[in-house]
């Protein structure tokens, strides 16, 4: 293969850039300084939106018993006890000052008696951009990342949606007292950045895991954000 760096040729006529972090950490991919400069300059333009979607980080611990617990929690035999994604996206987030890290691979709860994903816990009072207008659910996927904040929530760092974790499958995340993981984060324009930054998992942009009118509404809201 060959590298196709993000540069001004890509960004010149782009309003929304979606970066899906499906690269395995073992591949040691990093955003280059030229890419970072190009994206920073692009985000100074009003009407831009950068969507960052680092996928799950299953089995990051050296504790093999914990890896086995995680494996049994997500229940997907196609995903091994260690499958770590998103170094490229993480490097981009670090360079852009996005205080978020993708951790775990969590199985969402479902509506009792069905296979339908439980509704989002939507923080609509913080959603002044309308990303969750007419949105009640995302896609079911058995190993979704928790977007852990590494800075306090603020006007410029807003958790807009949380997803309930399957309570019947033990996991270190729920053992620590957590019941929901961060599924949607929005960083409105701030300082020199005129564009928005949104974090949500890449699986919400495919019909491979199902699809609902709610999800279509989310796509529309993102595309018409500004």
Image (tube, rainbow, N blue to C red):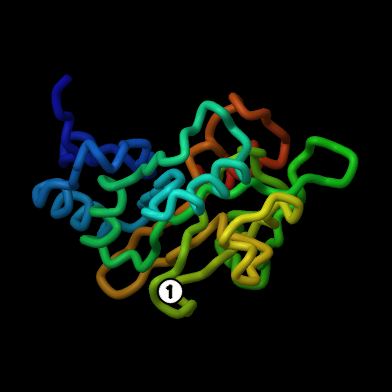
**Residue drawn 63% across the image and 29% down it:** 209
Q: Residue at x 59, y 60 (%)?
A: 181
Looking at the image, residue 145 sits to the left or right of residue 84; the answer is right
List the single residue furthest toward the top. 1
Q: Which residue is painted at 57% across and 49% down in the image? A: 69
Q: Nearer the viewer, residue 60 or 2?
A: 60
Can you see residue 135?
no
Task: Say which residue label 1 marks.
Answer: 156
> Where is residue 139 shown, x and y percent of the image?
65, 39
User: Which element type, helix, strand or loop, lies under badge 1?
Assistant: loop
Q: Give the number of callouts.
A: 1
Left or right of 63 on screen, residue 89: left
Quadrant of the rendered image containing residue 77: top right
Where in the figure is residue 126, as x and y percent of width and height?
A: 60, 71
Of residue 172 and residue 191, the one placed in the foreground of this image is 172
Residue 213 percent across, percent down from the top left: 72, 36
Vertical comparison of 3 with 61: above or below: above
In percent of width and height, residue 208 lies at 59, 24
């Amino acid at each position: 293969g060959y590298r196709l760096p993000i540069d001004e040729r890509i960004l010149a006529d782009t309003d929304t850039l979606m970066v899906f972090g499906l690269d395995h950490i073992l591949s040691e991919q990093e955003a280059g300084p030229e890419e970072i400069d190009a994206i920073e300059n692009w985000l100074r333009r009003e009407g831009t939106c950068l969507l960052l979607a680092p996928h799950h980080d299953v089995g990051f611990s050296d504790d093999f018993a914990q890896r086995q617990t995680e494996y049994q929690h997500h229940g997907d035999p196609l995903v091994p006890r260690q499958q770590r994604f998103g170094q490229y996206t993480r490097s981009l987030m670090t360079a852009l000052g996005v205080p978020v890290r993708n951790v775990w691979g969590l199985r969402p709860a479902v509506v009792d008696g069905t296979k339908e994903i439980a509704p989002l816990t939507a923080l609509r009072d913080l959603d002044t951009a309308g990303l969750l207008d007419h949105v009640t659910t995302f896609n079911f996927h058995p190993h979704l990342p928790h977007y852990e904040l590494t800075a306090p929530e603020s006007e410029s760092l807003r958790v807009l949606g949380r997803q309930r974790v399957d309570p019947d499958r033990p996991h270190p995340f729920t053992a620590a007292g957590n019941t929901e993981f961060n599924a949607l984060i929005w960083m409105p324009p701030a300082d020199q950045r005129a564009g928005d930054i949104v974090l949500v998992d890449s699986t919400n942009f495919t019909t491979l895991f199902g699809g609902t009118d709610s999800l279509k509404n989310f796509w529309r809201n993102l595309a018409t954000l500004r």
